[in-house]
Image (cartoon, rainbow, N blue to C red):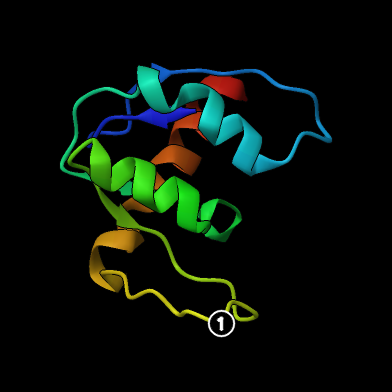
Amino acid sequence: MVCDGKGRPRLLHLSEGQTNDHKTAAAVIEDLPAASAMLADRAYSSAAFRQALVERGITPCIPPHAKHRIQHSYDATLYRQRHRIENMFEGHCS
């Protein structure tokens, strides 16, 4: 699910439950709405996804996996806004 800055749904991509998050991200990268930043959880912390976002002019705000050799920085204050997507699911799926 991709939400806008106010937590409103903008893009939904359904995939199999066992599908890797990187494959799902690759499937929707061309359909992402215009944005200045993308907040995503660690599951999307891959070099390829980050690069694809940068190429679209979107700043990745994704915490790195602890096991990754390269620890990318991210804006922790901005990342706290990721709760909006959780709120969207709570409000629409309960």
Q: Residue at x 55, y 61 (%)?
A: 42
Please give the name of the residue rendered at 46% of the width and 46% of the height, measured from the top-left corner: 49
Q: Is residue 37 left or right of residue 10?
A: left
Which residue is drawn at the image coordinates 58% and 72% (left, top)?
65
At which x and y percent is residue 28?
A: 48, 23
In the current view of this chain or complex, which residue is farthest to the right? 18
Amino acid at pointer 1:
Arg
Question: Circle 1 — which element?
Answer: loop
Residue 61 vs residue 44: left or right?
left
Image coordinates of residue 63 in percent, x first then y, are 45, 68
Q: Residues within 10 Å of mark 1 (few under 14, many from 20)?
A: few
31 relative to 59, above or below:
above
Counting from the top left corner in percent of width and height, residue 14 is at 65, 18
* Above or below for 57 versus 80: above
Report the residue marked by disc 1: 69
> Residue at position x 56%, y 82% from top?
69
- Provide residue 70's location: percent of width, then percent of height: 48, 79
